[in-house]
Image (cartoon, helix red, strand yellow):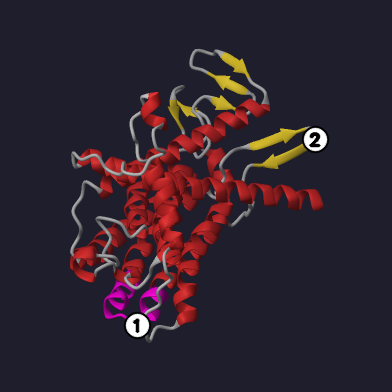
Amino acid sequence: MLIELLIGAIKAIIVLLMVLNLSAILLWFERKGSALIQDRIGANRAAITGVGRRLGLPNLGFVNTLMADPLKLFTKEDFVPAGADKFLHALAPFLAMFPVLITFAVVPFGDTLIIGDRHINLQAANLNVAALYILATIGLGVYGVALGGWASNNRWALLGGIRATAQMISYELAMGLAIVSVVMTYGTLDLQEMCRAQGGVWFGWLPRWGIFVQPVAFLLLLTAGMAETKRVPFDLPEGESELIAGYFTEYSGGKQAVFMLVDFAEIVLVSALITTFFFGGWQFPWLYPDGFHLPGGAFFALPNVAVAIIGIISFTVKVVAFCWLQILARWTLPRFRYDQLMRLGWKGLLPVALANVVVTACVIVLGGV
């Protein structure tokens, strides 16, 4: 029992470190990527003097983004405005970050790893109702945002919190229905079983990924997931041109850094869920637990450790690809007006999600007849 708890703790720590480090790297990627899109240099002022220049390396802004800026943020004065609720003002960033981090506990990042006679499931927490757990934890994230806006004693921050609450209701209904469609398709709430169901190929070459059986749910979850991150084109709670900085207008230093990190952690979470539901999760086409099965009958046996490592790499590459897609969309699309966002959520996404659930149910029933 003690060994199982230790293994579980190690897996949880690994997942948290992966998520937090990837979130920090995404901040660098966004700054340099947006600079390329807008034909400018981007972060490049801070550097380790002379080292890169002597080696002939370009200044890519790693010191700026990953060292100088975090150090500056976490050493700045922690300002709390007059009239604000100090306890709730300090609690809000934690409440925004905590639900995102605990959601990763049920996301499988690999298949079973066999070491001796011990089978280690590459998933921090193996829940057979993981899909319901995800819906529950994602819905908690808005409390930190709304509380931060209300506790700041600032009208612009309060408006940002109210916008976040209304926005959450409008798109999370569609998100929930998209996940329901996926659950109906695979007949399980267990994310690991969903990944295993997407193993193998159709017609000898086409991966059995969920995108090919639930393309509408994929589009719904991608759109609603991008709204979950509160970034352009869905950044109404932050709307700089309207609300200064929205719900975290009155935050500075480390608390502001946590709110900023939440956005990037949510990008990773949305990418992980899309990968798990629609792109096979850790599955690599033609890779089975005992090795590669290629078209034409060719087979290459591989040890379990090699298969597990390939699966982890496959999952990571897919997640990073969807992170890149979301950051690219953030610097490509214009912001919605608030009424346009509400119309998209209630009159666009929700009816399509309901129709997709009905069609999925009909196909399942008729297919079982």
**Magenta residues, start to end:** 146-165
Name the residue located 29 percent from the left edge and 69 percent from the top edge. Answer: 246
The answer to whether residue 143 is above or below residue 113 is: below
Q: Amino acid at mark 1?
A: Asn
In the picture of the structure, the residue carrying the numbered disc 1 is 153
Residue 199, percent from left and from top: 53, 33
The answer to whether marks 1 and 2 mark residues whose Cβ atoms lie closer than 8 Å is no
Amino acid type of the residue tagged 2 in the rendering = Asp
- Residue at image position (46%, 72%) is 92
Q: Say if the magenta span includes residue 155.
A: yes
Task: Say which mark, if any, is on residue 225.
Answer: none
In front of the other: 248 or 345: 248
Q: Main secondary structure of the magenta part?
A: helix
- Give residue 271's position: percent from left, percent from top: 42, 46
Q: Secondary structure at mark 1?
A: loop
* Residue at the bottom extreme, as displayed: 83
Q: Which residue is the site of mark 2?
A: 117
Decide: few, some or many residues near mark 2? Use Cα within 10 Å; few <14, some 14-19, many ≥20: few
From the viewer's perspective, tell me whether residue 11 is left or right of residue 138: right
